[in-house]
Amino acid sequence: MLLNEKQKKILFVILENGVMPSSNVYATLLKSGEKISLVTVKRALSEMVESRLLAVFGSGPSTSYGASALGRLFVPVDARGYCSAEPDKRYGLSRYNFDLFPAVPPEIFEEGEAQVLKSATMEYERRTKNLSDVIRKKELERLIIELAWKSSKIEGNTYTLLDTEKLIREQKEAAGHNKNEARMILNHKDAFNFIYNNKKNFKHLPA
């Protein structure tokens, strides 16, 4: 789904500020230097509701607009700029988004993107087809360590990468850390191993 510049700007305003009435969207755009009329904003909001990019809350004078799961999926995000901001200043949800996966369209990739992924997958399978068990195990262990460390760090864990490596390889907890931090990392490791050992059950998203 391709968004025009006006739709992108409106979506970003709503993502950063939460559910808003059209008047607040208009005022925020004006404040940012955008030259636009309230009528144009209201028309764009209606079009985005029809396209299921936005959800409507309330009715009449109390009508407000929020980003739908589909809108969150298709708005282009400057990942580098987003990550450069302090965590408590980043926009986003403070809860798990249960609507996200059901909103993913069956054909999420364009034809060219799907072909690139298919080619990359085939190349990966070719390169890894004859790997020795020793190398395969070593690479898998490295992936688990880095994934468990980074996933835990996102959730506020203070273990370093070296602390995480020692915990997973030697079962040694880092001194001066809460035991719950070690448990979090080991839970990530166990979750990865469960998915890896039962990968046939995770090939398709449930309808």
Image (cartoon, rainbow, N blue to C red):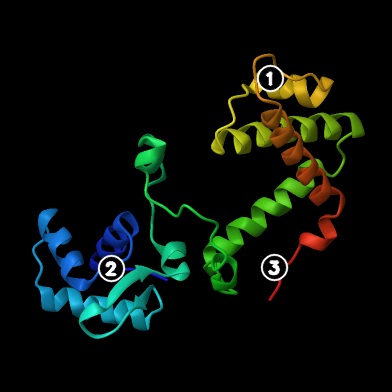
Amino acid tagged 3: Leu
- Percent across and percent down for residue 99 are 54, 69
Please tell me how crowded label 1 is: few (under 14), some (14-19), or many (20+) other residues with Cα within 10 Å.
Answer: some
Per the image, the residue denoted by label 3 is 205
CA separation in Å, label 1 and label 3: 34 Å
Near-viewer residue (74 or 15): 15
Instruction: Mark 2 or mark 1: name the one nearer the start of the chain.
Output: 2
| Residue at the farthest top position | 175
Near-viewer residue (128 or 36): 36
Tell me, for residue 7, which label it has, or none. Answer: 2
In the rendered view, would you say 183 is above or below 56? Answer: above
- Percent across and percent down for residue 147 are 67, 37
Please tell me how crowded label 2 is: few (under 14), some (14-19), or many (20+) other residues with Cα within 10 Å.
Answer: some
Q: Secondary structure at mark 2?
A: helix
Q: Secondary structure at mark 3?
A: loop
User: Left of 64 or right of it: where is 195?
Assistant: right
- Percent across and percent down for residue 124 are 73, 46
